[in-house]
Image (cartoon, helix red, strand yellow):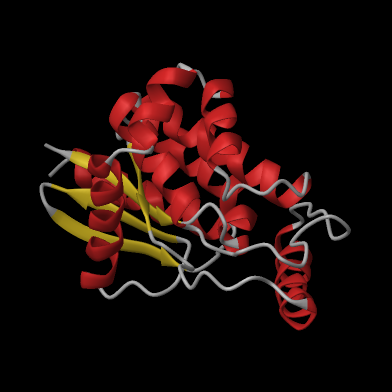
Amino acid sequence: MHARLLYVMDPMCSWCWGFAPVLASLAEQAALAGVPLQLVLGGLRRDGVAIDAVARVRYLGYWQAVNASTGQLFNFVDGLPEGLVYDTEPACRALVTARSLDADSVWPLAQLIQQAFYTSGVDVTRASVLVGLAEQAGIPRIEFAGAFDSAEQREATMADFSWVQDLGISGFPTLLAECNGQLALLTNGYQPLEVLAPLLGRWLERALHA
């Protein structure tokens, strides 16, 4: 049996930040059954447009909705400053790069990027910031920096985006469960742990006895 969870996300998607504690619990539940978690990056925004005052109000409205629904904390004062180019490709590429260098560091790095962006108001589109966060996650700075800027990792990131688009996934977070090449949708969009844990438990029971 080959089984895994596929978490389709973007570290600069506010609902993915809201979902982070739920995902951490689900990943632990799956790991106890010997089923690993793999992140697939979705590419939420790649328009390269700087945030203006109107856009900032709109995005902060999304953050407020996520905060109200999930309880996750946001820095409403420093977050999303005007002039920030809301391009999520670099942060996604950082996770793709980490996945190729040290798979165990990917989820810790995702959490560091999310915390920096949502609670500290850090510009996680900057390569220097991402290199520093990768180092915190345990990846040597020089090794990560070289790989992050490579054509190989840029292409691998675009391959993730294409895979997500080809499946018709348009919203994040999305959690898929794969067993022997067959995909099952656990959720498309935020749902609380009390809904998803039993669903995952039933899938694990079937997968382990397939």
Label total for image = 0
Q: Quadrant of residue 112?
A: top right
Residue 150 percent across, percent down from the top left: 30, 38
Looking at the picture, tell me which residue is in the foreground, 116 or 69: 116
Relative to 114, say whether 66 is above or below: below
User: For the C terminus, which image quadrant?
Assistant: top left
User: For the N terminus, which image quadrant?
Assistant: top left
Residue at position x 21%, y 71% in the image: 166
Looking at the picture, tell me which residue is in the foreground, 159 or 186: 159
Residue 177 percent across, percent down from the top left: 29, 52
Residue 168 percent across, percent down from the top left: 27, 75
Instruction: Determine whether, in the image, residue 28 is placed left or right of residue 41.
Output: right
Q: Quadrant of residue 170?
A: bottom left
Relative to 152, say whether 59 is above or below: below
Residue at position x 78%, y 55% in the image: 74
Residue at position x 32%, y 25% in the image: 101
| Residue 142, visible in the rendered structure | yes
